[in-house]
Amino acid sequence: MQYGKRKILINGAWVEGTKGDWFPTINPANREVLAEVARGDAADIDQAVEAAAGALAHGPWADMVPATRARLLHRIGALMRTHADELAEMETLDCGKPLGQARADMETSAQYFEYYAGVADKLFGSTIPVGKRYLDYTLREPIGVTAHITPWNFPLAIACRGVAPALTAGNTVVLKPAEQTPLTALRLGELALEAGLPAGVLNIVPGFGPDAGARLASHTHINHLTFTGSVETGIAVMQAAAENVVPVTLELGGKSPNIIFADANLKAAVQGAMQAIFSNAGQVCSAGSRLLIEEEVHDRFVQELARRAAGLRLGPGLSNPDIGPVVSEEQFQRVLHYLELGKQEGAQIVHGGEAATEGELQQGFFITPTLFDAVQPDMRIAQEEIFGPVLSILPFRQVDDVARLANNVPYGLVAAVWTRDIGKAHRLAADIKAGQIYINNYFGGGVGAPFGGYKKSGFGREKGMEALHAYTQVKNVCVMLD
């Protein structure tokens, strides 16, 4: 075991957990155990929430002025940069992604703390003109104890995406990382304490959904819940939070259309399409998993995609391949199931369509990059989120067909439009029901660009200034002056 035993962080102390149970986290490239992690349960969640509530009510965090809080958050970001190589290697081993992609994620993770640190002393209220006899003003206050249940595909970046704005607004946090990939979140806890974050402000409880996750979502003393994951689990945590009238931010994935017109810069569009579906082995909520391609350029575009897919190198994340393994045996079997389903539905395999088993790849959870052509809009591989390196290609003839095809799924997270006709691009951006629209790029924007979905992709917005609305509440004060 490279990382030994990793404990739970509660109230500034590292503890083994109430029951003393442990679970392994494995390297998906070779199935070797990386660490034994303390398995938190309902009792540990209770203690973490109690610690967060205590830190919110009294102590140095409760009394800390915003400018001081900003400096502390900057220190956390700086420490993440200092340890970026270590964090990237840890994340690569834990979830399988190529090392270069993990390094980019560490940059993003640090940026979240830097971005929100700059906002900590700028959460202004406002004055309301209600007449000369009154002074009416608003205060923007912390919402309280925030709960965060985070996924395994971007373990540190998505944790920081919620934790950083929550702390910036003066809240306290209980974080439950995904049981498949808890290591970098726990390392974040160590760095936060090193930076001087007071005890109880950030509590991290690794564990499984049915015990730790369910308890956190249903806890009577949390004030907000942020969840990223599947639609099914999102519905369950939303129902649990609703029992206590706790607001939620949900990001639940997608089946995003990547739309290529014949008049696009096709060289850039091919590169964009490859990045959109094969980054992180396709395990990206906003992956461009549906390629909508104008018939005029369909054949040569797909031929070029197939040529490039054939040249992609698969391997363990530390070798910095083009594609690493998927995260777990469960996810491996899920993707293989969809590959068989696509064949049964009559889609045409242009490339891939199977597990990769050559040499060292047979030791891990590797899937060949797969292109399904001649996909019909009602096929399950066109409707359901696969979360793997699998692209469904749907040709179209007319511009009028595109918005209908793009919107013909239960999701609405991301869409992209590739064209030199900027008017056409803007018209489509208005018609497509998705939270983010990329024009002539994919995965653009940054930590300041709000992110979230329409329809079953969830609701609420993370990133940017929009995220702070979820982690603050507005109080109105009206004073009679005479």
Image (cartoon, rainbow, N blue to C red):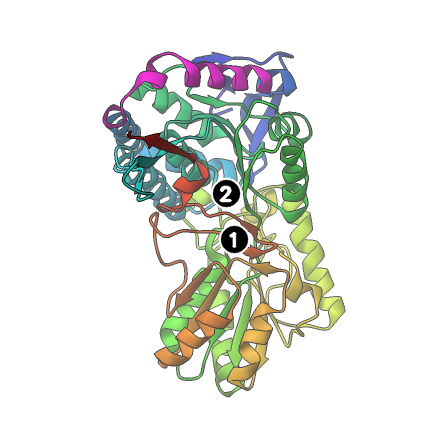
Give the secondary structure at mark 1.
Answer: helix
- Marked residue nearer the N-terminal end (2 or 1): 2
Secondary structure character of the magenta stretch overall: helix
Q: Is residue 307 at least partly visible in the picture? A: no
Mark 2 and mark 1: span between their CA atoms? 9 Å
Mark 2 Cα-neighbour bin, 10 Å: few <14, some 14–19, many ≥20: many
Disc sitting over residue 281 in the figure = 1
**Who's the residue at 32% across and 42% down the image?**
107
Residue 345 image point, x, y percent: 74, 69
Mark 1 Cα-neighbour bin, 10 Å: few <14, some 14–19, many ≥20: many
Q: Is residue 464 at least partly visible in the picture? A: yes
Label 1 sits on what residue type? Ala
Residue 31 image point, x, y percent: 59, 36
Disc sitting over residue 96 in the figure = 2
Depicted 170 relative to depicted 450: above or below? above
Give the secondary structure at mark 2.
Answer: loop
* Residue 130 picture quarter: top left
* Residue 238 picture quarter: top right
Residue 399 image point, x, y percent: 51, 83
**Name of the residue lying farthest toward the right:** 344
* Residue 368 picture quarter: bottom right
Q: Which image quarter is the C terminus in?
A: top left
Magenta-span inclusion, residue 56: yes
Q: Are marks 2 and 1 in contact (CB under 8 Å)?
A: yes
Magenta-span inclusion, residue 203: no
Where does the magenta region start and end?
Answer: 45-68
**Name of the residue lying farthest toward the front:** 482
Residue 129 image point, x, y percent: 30, 44
